[in-house]
Amino acid sequence: MVNMRDIETSNDGLLDEPLGRVSIISYGSGHMLNDITSSCWFTYLLVFLTDVGLSPGDAAIVMLSGQLADGFTTIFVGELMDRFGHFKLWHAGGSILVAISFSSVFGSCVPCKLMGTNSSTLETVGYSTFAAIFNVGWAVTQVAHMSMVNCMSSNPTSRVSLVSCRNAFTMVANLSLYGIALLIFTILQSVNVMFQYRWIAYVSISIGSCFVVIFLVGTKEPGSIRHCVDKSLSRISWTYWFKKVLYYQVALVYTLTRLVTNVSQAFLAFYVINDLEMSQSSKALVPAIIYICSLIVSVILQETRWSSWRLKLYFSAGAVLWILSGLGIVFLPSRMHNLMYAISIIIGAANALMTVTSISMEGVLVGEDLNGCAFVYGSLSFVDKVSCGVVLYILESYQGSTEIRSNLGTAFGYSITRLGLGLVPAVCSLLSSIVAYTMDLPDPDTRRRPLVEPLLV
């Protein structure tokens, strides 16, 4: 007769074994579709929607519907996966939603074709619906993919390798998106701009879907989630975190940091084309420079041994760099637009410094309270996505407003795009650095927690 306890012991032994290279690479490829579409979403969605004829306010509604759907889905889908498992099934379903809906987000208005009318209200509803579906699928895929790490192996080295490989594919996805965009903007200059964006979206979906197939074929479904959570510890109540001042401080710093990166990414294409009057290829080249610089700084920071004062110092340094960049963006005249490439390098370094340290602060907040980490990361992610959607909605709603003339007697005015890209991230950086300074952070245990999380964002 088979002893079930012996089987469990045998399974745990297998989970302690290091994973093979094929398993690690196939797992890492599973988030390519999410990463490449996410980069396209924040960089080009608002530009595309206004180009197809939506007003800035309607385009803002589409973006907001997606962000809200993402935020609320993130909260509930994790609990469902904890109960029912089957991560690969969730991942496959989410990926299908992403591929189908994202092609519709950057495609023509489906309801308009079905109804035979092109009213602005129907266009807004149509694009908002597919934007919400896309973000639901995106959140499902993200949670399923990240949840598999602890369930695929209990070997610490393998877990680090899985996350590192995922990080590597995130880099590949982002650089691929900007490479595709640069190629299309250069080759298809004579083609309508709307079709250029659609080609970017379609090529991105095709590439990402190929990697999803690799993930589904090459990655085994974890057979048990029993070892994912330490059952010897009681689940930490939400009220435990609400009583900690540090929770609110970290939440504020993280949310403000995400606003800095997302708002700047969303308005960058508008700024380089409309305000600086740069070439169409700059919509791909400038974001690529920012990302490459951010990547280089992030890799350097991976080797840093963190302490509480270092976290605050590096975060403040990033905030100062963004404040200086913001001022440069506000006052940069179009005739000197080539200076934007230099500003892009500074922005990339600032983004990396703020992102790496803010996520590290999340890890310090959680500490050894692993049975409550899901709530911390989930709640902060929810606040980040909703607040980002609201801020982008407000800014984009005023995108077409009359320019505010400077009192300094300069020859150019300040558009909402210029102010949104320059001042909003700069103000968020200033506020977040003040909050970070007031934190009473315990020193992170760098010997037990290698810094592998920052590149996940």
Image (cartoon, helix red, strand yellow):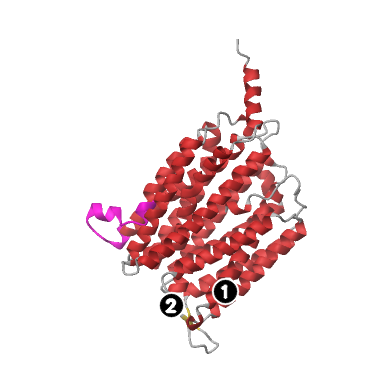
Residue 90 shown left or right of residue 365 in the figure: left
Q: Secondary structure at mark 2?
A: loop
Callout 1 amino acid: Ala
What is the magenta segment's predominant secondary structure?
Answer: helix
Q: Is residue 42 above or below residue 449?
A: below
Please tell me how many numbered marks the rendered image carries: 2
Q: Is residue 192 above or below residue 275?
A: above
Q: Is residue 351 above or below residue 456?
A: below
- Confirm whether residue 236 shows in the render: no
Residue 342: which numbered mark, if any?
A: 1
How far apart in space, not on screen, are marks 2 and 1 (Cα)? 17 Å
Residue 222 shown left or right of residue 182 in the figure: right
N-terminal label among 2 and 1: 2
Q: Secondary structure at mark 1?
A: helix
Residue 428 shown left or right of residue 30 in the figure: right
Report the residue marked by disc 2: 277
Q: Residue 305 location, x and y as percent?
A: 75, 54
17 in magenta: no
Q: Which residues are magenta?
A: 102-122
Q: Nearer the viewer, mark 2 or mark 1?
A: 1
At 41% across and 73% down in the image, what residue appears? 400
Callout 2 amino acid: Glu
Residue 325, quarter of the rendered image: bottom right
Q: Residue 414 location, x and y as percent?
A: 49, 79
Q: Is residue 7 above or below residue 63?
A: above
Closest to the observer: 208 or 409? Answer: 208
118 in magenta: yes
